[in-house]
Every structure is written in structure tokens, then in C-alpha cells.
Image (cartoon, helix red, strand yellow):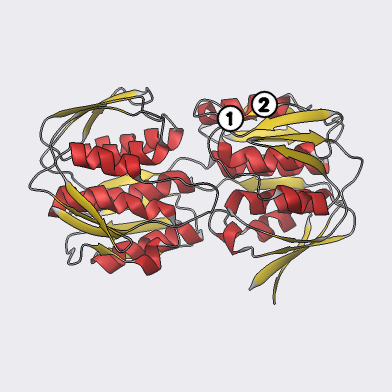
């Protein structure tokens, strides 16, 4: 199993390109099942979760051509011959649940394993199932599989009792080819959901009010193919900004064209003392003369600060001047990296869904173990600033969402090496 050795204390300097958004790519791949025509996706991140979703589509009978160098995927789902999303694939990644709605829409049946992914809270699929049942799907759970059939998905008026990114995506995918006009209230509005809706509209869908929490979707009989460029990954960009901040570095992020999706992130990070500027498609970060300031944080649904950057921000606050309080409002178990940070000398106390972080002068190298995707990145970030060597184990979590992390960090001057145990 691969692990990182990281020698901390080097200020990051240089320029790297932000990859396409993983969290937009995955539902887009599921959406390819809604058409029999060819779909071309560009700016595709080369990460394990994308490979897993491609494997799932291929297992269903789709043809997938992946040019990793060009970061392009060609998908044609004209010969789907299997409606089973097997446990062996789905257990690796929660996003696999999104094939359920397209299979029902196009082929009227599906058998999808209950999903896996990061162990950062219950994240049940109840809302996904509730939406589809309201749309006239017959659904049951049997031996860990969701069994679903329908004569035809029909339009509904649905109020989400809580804001859910995953269930909003399922509802959008289901409503696109349904009969009638679907109205969805209290939707998640994340930029990645907006990007999915824009892609579907280019395929012939009729989705209005994109970007609001009230979506109106007029069902159509079929969708065409599309050639679509995926938005930049705001979570990856934010992670590199935090890595720059904790090492007191100076970096540029290119391909950062979708700045509106970064406003909430940049606003909060600027409060920590960072100098962040944006021109054209470049975000410039200068932390070389910054005094890192303790800053309180609450994760919220978009446009609030994203939960996917909370663990990294927590790492940053371990070396801030003062005490910060960080509250996690989205997931109920997203402080799993905290005990590992404390092994490195951090002073963090967990209190239910909050942590109190007292900034320390230095972190020290230690052997630490990753538990989830974003928590893994938080350990790498802490290691970049720590004295001596840190060993970060179980880095397969990182490979799920960060492309060529060690190569990118090395290009910025970091001393990081991937090794095999």
C-alpha cells in the first residue's frame, strides 16, 4: 500500500494548473446514460473516482474511451445491456448511486448496490429513494441492493426537507426525461450542480432557474450528445491555497476561470491574513509575509464555506496566532483527522460538531494514517509545514480526488515522495 514521506519546512513557490472538478465530472458521467449519442467531456481530472465511475459505465455496457493525456472522455451508452451496478464497484465510491435515476429513466429498471466512499457520516440514500418513489418508481431494498422498476417516471412537486447535494442530483437526472414539469424546492445550489444542469441543457434538457434553490425541469423525450468542458475544481484550488498559506509560500493557480464559485472560499482564507488576487484565469496567493490569523469557521451549504475544505482549514489553524472554533454543519463525523494532527503536536479539542484549535508554534513530523479523502489532504498540508519527516499512510484516499498530488507539490518545491510498503 502506497504512502508519502514528507520533509516539511519548505515554502511552496511556483505555478500549477487547476484540474477539472471531480464533483462535477461524476454526475456528468452518470448523465451519459440518458442519451444513446456520444458524449465528450473535456478537462476531466485523472483521479481514481473518475476511473471507478468509468468502470461502472463499462460494466453496464457503455463504451468509454479515455485519453488521459488530453484529459478527455468519450462515452457512448447506446448498447446498455445490464442494469446491475455491482457492489464491487459501487462500494468504492458513493457517487455510484447516481446511475440509479438514469437507468430508471431510460430502461425502466435498475439494481444498484448501496454505495460506499468516505466514512464521514451516515449520508443515507433515503432522500434519493423518496424522490424516485414520488416519481412512480417501485423501489425495495434487498440484501444490500436497491431494486427499482417503473413504467414511466412522472413529474412531481418536491420539497427537500434538508438541502442535499446527492439527492438534488438524483432528482435532476430523474426529472430530465420524465413526463411533465417537475418543480424542486430547497435544492442544493453547488457550482458543480449548476455545471451539470448547463451540460444537460446543451443536450436538450429544459432546466430553468439554474443556480437557485428552486429548479423547474420540463421533461423531454430524448437527449442528444454533447461536447462539454468541465469547470475547474474549487476544492483542489482551495487545498493548494491552504498548502501555500501554511508554508508561507507564493503560488499561482492557472485554469481558475470560474472565480464566482471560489468567492466564499477566498473571502474566508483572506481573513487568515493571506494576500489573494485574481486576474484573467489566474489566482495569485502570497503568504510570504503574512501573519497567520486564527479565524472561526462554519461549514454551510453553498454559497457557504464547503465542508470538503474544512479538514484542510483545520490543519491551517493549527499554526495560526490565537484560538479558532471550527463547526461542521454538513457531516457528523468529519474530524477523523484530528487525532492524527494531535500526534503532530496540534492542540485541538473536539466538542460534538465543533473543534477548538489553539495555534501552536510548530508541528512535528510523525507517522499518521489517512481515513478519508479530504482528511488525508489535511494531513499532507500539516506535514508540509512540520519539522522533520512525516509519513502519511493509506494515501489511496488522496488518489480518489487529487491528480498527481506529489508531482504538483514537488514542482512547487515540496519534499514529498510516494513509496510502497
Q: Secondary structure at mark 2?
A: helix
**Residue 70: quarter of image:** bottom left
Say few, some or many: other residues with alpha carbon within 10 Å of mark 1 (under 14 / 14 to 19 / 20 or more): many
Q: Nearer the viewer, residue 221 or 359?
A: 359
Query: Residue 418 at what x, y percent from top left?
Result: 70, 68
Residue 149 is left or right of residue 364, and the answer is left
For the question of whether residue 311 can be seen, the reply is yes
Residue indicated by mark 1 = 305
Mark 2 highlights which residue? 268
Percent of width and height locating residue 8? 84, 54
The N terminus lies in which quarter of the figure? bottom right
Residue 414 vs residue 370, the one in the foreground: 370
Quadrant containing the C terminus in the rendered view: bottom right
**Residue 254 makes an appearance in the image:** no
Instruction: Please rate how many residues cluster around mark 2, counting C-alpha atoms within 10 Å: few if below 14, some from 14 to 19, many from 20.
Output: some
Residue 298 point in image, percent of width and height: 63, 28
Specify the quadrant of the image occupied by residue 206. Answer: top left
User: In the depicted view, which residue is nearer to us: 134 or 72?
Assistant: 134
Q: Residue furthest left?
A: 151
Label 1: element kind: loop
Q: Residue at x 62, y 57 (%)?
A: 371
**Image-quadrant location for residue 334:** top right
Q: Where 91 falls versus 160 (above or below)?
A: below
Horizontally, residue 344 falls left or right of residue 142, namely right
Q: Seen in the image, is 7 located left or right of residue 199? A: right
State the CA–CA distance, disc 2 to disc 1: 8 Å
- Name the outermost residue toward the right: 361
The picture places residue 228, in percent across and down from the top left corner, at: 34, 44
| Residues at discs 2 and 1 in contact (Cβ within 8 Å) | yes
Q: Residue at x 21, y 62 (%)?
A: 83
At x 82% / y 29%, what residue is drawn? 323
276 vs 251: above or below: above
Amino acid at each position: 500500500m502506497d504512502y508519502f514521506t514528507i520533509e516539511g519546512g519548505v515554502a511552496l513557490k511556483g505555478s500549477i494548473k487547476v484540474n477539472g472538478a471531480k464533483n462535477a465530472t461524476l454526475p456528468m458521467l452518470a448523465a451519459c446514460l440518458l442519451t444513446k449519442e456520444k458524449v465528450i467531456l473535456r478537462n476531466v481530472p485523472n483521479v481514481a473516482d473518475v476511473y471507478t465511475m468509468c468502470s461502472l459505465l463499462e460494466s453496464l455496457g457503455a463504451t468509454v474511451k479515455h485519453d488521459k493525456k488530453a484529459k478527455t472522455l468519450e462515452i457512448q451508452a447506446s448498447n446498455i445491456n445490464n442494469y446491475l451496478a455491482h457492489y464491487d464497484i459501487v462500494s468504492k465510491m458513493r457517487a455510484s448511486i447516481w446511475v440509479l435515476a438514469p437507468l430508471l429513466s431510460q430502461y425502466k429498471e435498475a439494481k444498484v448496490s448501496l454505495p460506499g466512499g468516505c466514512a464521514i457520516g451516515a449520508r443515507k440514500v433515503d432522500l434519493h429513494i423518496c424522490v424516485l418513489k414520488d416519481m412512480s418508481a417501485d423501489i425495495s431494498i434487498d440484501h444490500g441492493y436497491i431494486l427499482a422498476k417503473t413504467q414511466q417516471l412522472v413529474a412531481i412537486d418536491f420539497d427537500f426537507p434538508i438541502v442535499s447535494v446527492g439527492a438534488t442530483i438524483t432528482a435532476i437526472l430523474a426529472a430530465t426525461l420524465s413526463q411533465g414539469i417537475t418543480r424542486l424546492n430547497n435544492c442544493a445550489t453547488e457550482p458543480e450542480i449548476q455545471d451539470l444542469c448547463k451540460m444537460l441543457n446543451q443536450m436538450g434538457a429544459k432546466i430553468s432557474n439554474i443556480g437557485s434553490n428552486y429548479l423547474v425541469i420540463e421533461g423531454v423525450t430524448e437527449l442528444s450528445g454533447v461536447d462539454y468542458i468541465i469547470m475547474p475544481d474549487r476544492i483542489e484550488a482551495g487545498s493548494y491555497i491552504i498548502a501555500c498559506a501554511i508554508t508561507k509560500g507564493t503560488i499561482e493557480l492557472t485554469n481558475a476561470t470560474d472565480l464566482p464559485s471560489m468567492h466564499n472560499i477566498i473571502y474566508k482564507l483572506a481573513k487568515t491574513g493571506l494576500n489573494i488576487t485574481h486576474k484573467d484565469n489566474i489566482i495569485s496567493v502570497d503568504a510570504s509575509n503574512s501573519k497567520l490569523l486564527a479565524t472561526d469557521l462554519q461549514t454551510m451549504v453553498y454559497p457557504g464555506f464547503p465542508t470538503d475544505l474544512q479538514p484542510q482549514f483545520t490543519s491551517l489553524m493549527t499554526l495560526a496566532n490565537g484560538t479558532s472554533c471550527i463547526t461542521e454543519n454538513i457531516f457528523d463525523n468529519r474530524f477523523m483527522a484530528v487525532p492524527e494532527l494531535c500526534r503532530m503536536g496540534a492542540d485541538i479539542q473536539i466538542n460534538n460538531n465543533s473543534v477548538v484549535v489553539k495555534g501552536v508554534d510548530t508541528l512535528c513530523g510523525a507517522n499518521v494514517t489517512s481515513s478519508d479523502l479530504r482528511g488525508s489532504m489535511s494531513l499532507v498540508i500539516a506535514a508540509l509545514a512540520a519539522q522533520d519527516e512525516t509519513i502519511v499512510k493509506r494515501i489511496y484516499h488522496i488518489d480518489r480526488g487529487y491528480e498527481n498530488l506529489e508531482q504538483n507539490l514537488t514542482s512547487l518545491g515540496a519534499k514529498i515522495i510516494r513509496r510502497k510498503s
